[in-house]
Image (cartoon, grey):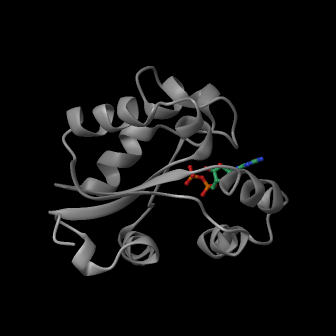
Amino acid sequence: MERTLSLIKPDAVGRQQIGAVINVLEQGGLRLVGAKLLRLSRAQAEGFYAVHRERPFFGALCTFMCSGPIVALVLEGPNAIQRNRELMGPTDPAKAPAGTLRQLFGTSIERNAVHGSDGPDTARTEIAYFFSASELNGLA
Ligand code: GDP
């Protein structure tokens, strides 16, 4: 069993695609153990994407990520990190296979509908960025 963080980004939330995204994740074999809707401050967006701060798209990415509400999800399942990445598809929606979240709901390399942790260490850090242990499994 493994856990990973998923974010439904402001583009998909703005188009009322929260339910459709969660449906793909659940039908894909992942279980929701944490969920919240929130709007990131600039500082929170910059902190979340700190690893990208030297990249040319960092400023635009942070502006986008705090442009509207997002949904943060903790997903659980066998190989949840890898499974979520498969269900998302690659960063660029134009290159994403049919039926993946980014093909279905993404519109550009920046506005690509969802985020997913890329490994066990980032999953742990990213889950802790949004959730305390007592907020998982409906315990809060
Ligand atoms: P991910 O793991 O597939 O989300 O991709 P990365 O970690 O490389 O990038 C993080 C996020 O930055 C992506 O999901 C996009 O929203 C955005 N991004 C990545 N590459 C580019 C780019 O070349 N241009 C712009 N504007 N945004 C990008």
Q: Is residue 45 left or right of residue 35?
A: right
Foreground residue among 131 and 59 = 131
Q: Residue at x 33, y 38 (%)?
A: 22
Q: Residue at x 63, y 36 (%)?
A: 92
Foreground residue among 20 and 81 = 20
The image shows residue 63 at horizontal and vertical percentages of 77, 56
Q: Residue at x 76, y 72 (%)?
A: 53
Q: Is residue 41 left or right of residue 37?
A: right
Q: Residue furthest front?
A: 140
The image shows residue 133 at horizontal and vertical percentages of 25, 79
Q: Residue furthest top?
A: 98
The image shows residue 128 at horizontal and vertical percentages of 39, 78
Q: Residue furthest right?
A: 56
The image shows residue 31 at horizontal and vertical percentages of 19, 49
Residue 20's place in the image compared with 67, above or below, is above
* Count of numbered labels shown in the rendering: 0
Foreground residue among 104 and 79 = 104
Q: Is residue 137 left or right of residue 42?
A: left
Which of the 4 quarters of the picture holds residue 138?
A: bottom left
Residue 98's place in the image compared with 95, above or below, is above
Residue 70's place in the image compared with 25, above or below, is below
Q: Residue at x 36, y 73 (%)?
A: 131
- Quarter of the figure with the C terminus: bottom left
Which of the 4 quarters of the picture holds residue 55?
A: bottom right
